[in-house]
Image (cartoon, rainbow, N blue to C red):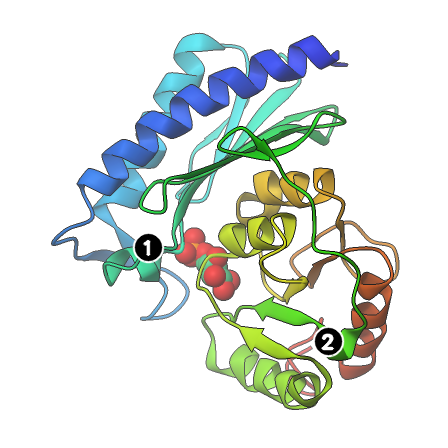
Amino acid sequence: MSTSAEDRSALLAIAVDIAREAGRVAAEGQAGIDVLDTKSTPTDVVTEMDRAVEELIRERVLARRPDDSVLGEEGADETGSSGVRWIVDPIDGTVNYLYGREDWAVCIAVEAEGRTVAGVVAAPVRGDLYTATLGGGAYCNGERLAVAPPVPLDMALVATGFGYSARRRAQQAEVLRTVLPRVRDIRRGGSAAVDLCGVARGRTNAYYERGLNPWDWGAAALIAQEAGARVGGLHGAPPNPDLTIAAPPGLFEELHDLLAGLGADTDGPEGG
Ligand code: IPD
């Protein structure tokens, strides 16, 4: 389905309604939350709330748009006929959520013709609601977002994150060993979506991470892009699980070239 600016705004309005409700429910459930299950490793956790919030979002989307598809981190995988797909991370930053920390977010991206056309990242404990539509700009709580003014790599505050497997982390530490002395400093916030929104808001200059999934970057990559960042993988690829980089043009290329040379899109010589 090809979308007009009005279609995108209408889809965003639905996403915002649902993300606000989901964020409220998740925030109310944070105190005293415990681990329900684990995924790729014992530290890759799922809480009862990850599942309950994803189910709530799935139900709300399909109640309003029954012919759409829904893909979610916790397993939602509905295929509809409309050509519109909702990509959902019920709680990005689950470990922060588990530890009673503030930086976690409900993320909803809406895709049409394979492109993200609307996205919302709700970080309810922070009181931040980030939104964007393709071509329509990015906002936080209604205020227009713009990336920080350009800086060279050695003056850049760079956010990153780490995967859950020991092998991947060993390689990420190797990459960081070279990156750290070449930048202003590093931040590890614990939510890829909040990190990408941080670039959009000028709270960091750049962000990179290996191992993200479409639900981690979907909404937030559009927000960063609409705020003026370039968001992509290596060598002209779109954001992908091998590597996602976000930074204003110029800094993006500098960071890209450094990371490409370090094998930041691999798990090291033995890990592939
Ligand atoms: C994780 C967070 C974290 C990032 C991990 C992600 P989850 O998402 O975004 O910051 O470093 O790569 O898996 O598991 O909390 O939804």
Pick the quarter of the image with the C terminus: bottom right
Query: Residue 32: image x %, image y %?
Result: 11, 54
Residue ranking furthest to the left: 32
What's under tag 2, amino acid-wise? Met
Instruction: Tell me: is circle 2 under 8 Å from ligand 1.
Output: no
For mark 1, does the 10 Å Cα neighbourhood hold few (<14), some (14 to 19), or many (20 or more) residues?
some
Using the image, tell me which numbered label, if any, was put on residue 16: none
User: Tags 1 and 2 in contact by the CB under 8 Å rule?
Assistant: no
The residue depicted at 37 percent of the width and 60 percent of the height is: 39
Rounded to the nearest angstrom, the CA distance separating label 1 from label 2 is 27 Å
The residue depicted at 16 percent of the width and 57 percent of the height is: 34
The residue depicted at 73 percent of the width and 85 percent of the height is: 182
What's under tag 1, amino acid-wise? Glu
What element does badge 1 sit on?
Answer: loop
The residue depicted at 60 percent of the width and 79 percent of the height is: 185
Residue under label 1: 102
Observer able to see residue 197: yes
Q: In this rendering, would 31 be left or right of 120?
A: left
Residue under label 2: 155
Q: Looking at the image, how many numbered discs can be counted on the residues?
A: 2
Q: In this rendering, would 268 be left or right of 233?
A: left
Question: Which is more toward the observer, 5 or 235?
Answer: 5
Observer able to see residue 80: no
Pick the quarter of the image with the N terminus: top right
Q: In this rendering, would 133 be left or right of 102?
A: right
Q: Is residue 181 above or below residue 31?
A: below
The mark that comes first in sequence, 1 or 2, is: 1
Query: Residue 116: image x %, image y %?
Result: 68, 31
Q: Is residue 2 above or below residue 19?
A: above
Q: Is residue 219 above or below residue 270?
A: above
Question: Which is more toward the observer, 36 or 235?
Answer: 235
Instruction: Tell me: is circle 1 under 8 Å from ligand 1.
Output: no
